[in-house]
Image (cartoon, helix red, strand yellow):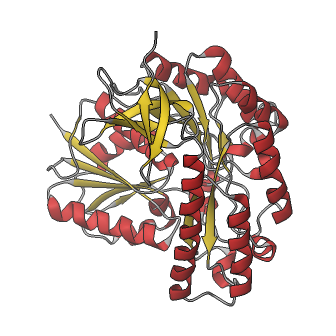
Amino acid sequence: MKTVSFLTLGCKVNQYDTDAMRSLFLARGYEEVSAKDKADICVINTCSVTHIGERKSRQMIRRAKRLNPQTKIIVTGCYAQLDPKTIQQIDGVNLIIGTQDRAKVVDLIEAYGSSSQAHNAVHDIFETSQFEELNWAHPASNRARSYLKIQEGCNNYCAFCIIPYTRGKLKSRGVEDIYHEARRLDEQGFKEVVLTGIHLGNYGVDLGRQVDLADVVKMLLERTHISRIRLGSIESVEISEELVNLIATNERVCPHLHLPLQSGSEEILRKMRRHYHLQEYVDLIPSLRARIPNLAVTTDLIVGFPGETAELFTETMATLKKLRFAGVHVFPYSKRNGTAAAKFPDQVPEAVKKERVHAAEKVAEQTATDYRRSFIGKTTNVLLEQQTEDGAWKGFTPHYCQLKIKGEGLKAGMICSTRVVSDDGTMLIGERIEEG
């Protein structure tokens, strides 16, 4: 039996794409093995959102070939789409696919995998206007959560972002196609689905606005029994009144919104070509919290953007402290050739970026801790996903706080009522509330 391994860098969309390709290989009779084992084929799903992601992608390719010189290397994902010529020059690569045609991955590797030269199957992503249906069956697993990709591409072209050039224009998945995959997840016992995409909040725009993200959520509530529906990253200006109502009134929709801020300075937001003003964002957060009790608001932040002076960074820090996020992903600005910001003057030195990342992370860690500790003494539930070394189980609450409990008869996929008793600095500690 032929064997295949998978290595994935980057975002939730990449993870979904890897899972889909895994299913396609398994359906064709391949056996999955660890990346450390000597697989016949190694699929490497790359990232290009930062230069570090690209560097790690190249390192991963070389390491995979070094560990197993006989393996056939497939390189896919954003970096493959963006720069296939560079990847083609890396010794040992057999096939380059990009961010389209993943449905053909098995056929392509069987057709070209034995070639002594890397076959470049990447084509112009802007020629693609339809969402690529992979039609994959979710393999049985102990996972409690699954990503559900409903959208691809982005039309925003923020000054710092390379992703529109790697994923192409906005492409929304058909509602019925979403339903059929959600039904499979439901039937296989997954308790939570995470709706994901490159520009999730713009779902339906390319379909003539006949449907939107709220319609997808309503459909899942009405036509499936999935216990939890969680939204992936969504732009603050794309939150509709109907979507807020769904979160506020239905316990199956997780009270968690990931709203990328990117900068707490109005001047930097303007330079970034973001589609909102700082005050709009600042005003939105308390209004959402007022309507959705205990709402978890998480965000992304880029520091060291070109032209970010010490004074402007101070503004960002003040915004960060004011909004008190439940979680923040802090990134140093990464210069991406081909984006508008790559040509901006006043590029910030790397050492300064590192200092600002550290300062922002320190504030973010404190506000995240404060948010978690607000649940001590309260009752919530946890979806168990993984057993720890000490025999306990951990998973996530609806508010996306990690929580650990002990007890008899626990297993992955269980949703347990829990009384929160403490916080260990990284996650909540709970006591199971026995039913009956």
* Residue that appears at 65% across and 55% down: 325
* Residue that appears at 32% across and 26% down: 407
Which of the 4 image quarters holds residue 60?
bottom left
> In the image shown, does 148 or 396 lie closer to the viewer?
396
Percent position (x, y) of residue 271? 76, 75
The total of numbered circles placed on residues is 0
Quadrant that contains the N terminus: top left
Which of the 4 image quarters holds residue 210?
top right
Percent position (x, y) of residue 402? 46, 43
Percent position (x, y) of residue 376? 54, 41
162 sits to left or right of 425: right
Rendered view: 314 above or below 16 = below
> In the image shown, does 246 or 22 lie closer to the viewer?
246
Mark yes or no: residue 376 visible.
Answer: yes
26 sits to left or right of 396: left
Rendered view: 297 above or below 415 = below
Which of the 4 image quarters holds residue 394?
top left
* Residue that appears at 59% across and 16% down: 224
Mark yes or no: residue 336 visible.
Answer: no
Percent position (x, y) of residue 429? 42, 40
